[in-house]
């Protein structure tokens, strides 16, 4: 039996960006009042359920970020991991998990950030980056920008430099990109 992975149809390097955006927009599912009343949750699982679309999204980012000399791709727990890990693999980069408090076993650096009510914290291992590493932040949804901003602060605290921030979808009306001053923000779909 062959050990090579199954080939997918339409194996062009990367689909045209606007066509790809439209395919993602069509696939994503809105779930009203989740996880609480008043929130319109953007469900990415239909994108993951379509292996050609999932592949084309990752390859689109490989084309965009491949020439940028990225050393480390970081994903934010937990949906960010889903996109960051295959992108890191394809770019030949390290993958750095940024996690919720208390999940990482070794010594950590952390950044606290404001939520609508109260605060939350993100953590990474304190030895995760070499000084000056170029880091690409990846998450599924950019909403207020608080999570991505905290991740950028954490990367800098660890000695890295943020090369960019990549999102499948941006909730444009929340203007989250304004939190990421000086960071190139790469969004596939704006809702
Ligand atoms: P924010 O810090 O407000 O930019 O929120 C971004 C984080 O919350 C990301 O990790 C998203 O996965 C998640 N998130 C925020 N709003 C939504 C939404 N409407 N649908 C799905 N995920 C969301």
Image (cartoon, grey):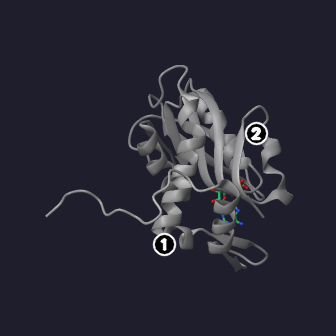
The crowding category of the residue bearing disc 1, from other C-alpha atoms within 10 Å (few below 14, some 14 to 19, many at least 20), is few
Q: Is 30 drawn above or below residue 135 in the view shown? A: below
Badge nearest the viewer, 2 or 1: 1
Determine if residue 100 is in view: no
Residue bearing the label numbered 1: 49
Q: Position of residue 115 (x, y in %)?
A: 74, 54
Q: Specify whether residue 71 is in view.
A: yes
Report the front residue among 191 and 26. Answer: 26
* Residue occupied by mark 2: 180
Q: Quadrant of residue 186?
A: top right
Q: Position of residue 135 (x, y in %)?
A: 56, 33
User: Rounded to the nearest whole Å, what is the CA distance between mark 2 and mark 1?
Assistant: 30 Å
Task: Tell me which residue sits at (69%, 66%) in the image.
Answer: 22
Looking at this rendering, what residue extends furthest in the left direction?
1
Residue drawn at x 29%, y 59% is 5
Q: Nearer the viewer, residue 112 or 7?
A: 7
- Residue name at image x 65 percent, y 37 percent: 164
């Amino acid at each position: 039996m062959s050990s090579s992975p199954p080939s997918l149809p339409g194996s062009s390097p990367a689909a045209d960006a606007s066509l790809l955006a439209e395919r993602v927009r069509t696939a994503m599912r809105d779930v009203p009042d989740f996880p609480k009343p008043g929130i319109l949750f953007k469900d990415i699982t239909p994108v993951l359920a379509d292996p050609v679309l999932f592949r084309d999204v990752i390859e689109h980012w490989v084309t965009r970020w491949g020439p940028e000399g990225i050393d480390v791709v970081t994903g934010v727990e937990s949906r960010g991991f889903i996109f960051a890990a295959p992108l890191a693999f394809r770019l030949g980069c390290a993958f750095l998990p940024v996690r919720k408090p208390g999940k990482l076993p070794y010594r950590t650096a952390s950044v606290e950030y404001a939520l609508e009510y109260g605060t939350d914290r993100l953590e990474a291992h304190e030895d995760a980056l070499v000084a000056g590493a170029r880091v690409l932040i990846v998450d599924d949804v950019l909403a207020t920008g608080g999570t991505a901003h905290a991740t950028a602060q954490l990367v800098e605290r660890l000695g890295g430099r943020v090369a960019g921030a990549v999102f499948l979808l941006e909730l444009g009306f929340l203007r989250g990109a304004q939190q990421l001053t000086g960071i190139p923000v790469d969004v596939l779909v704006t809702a």
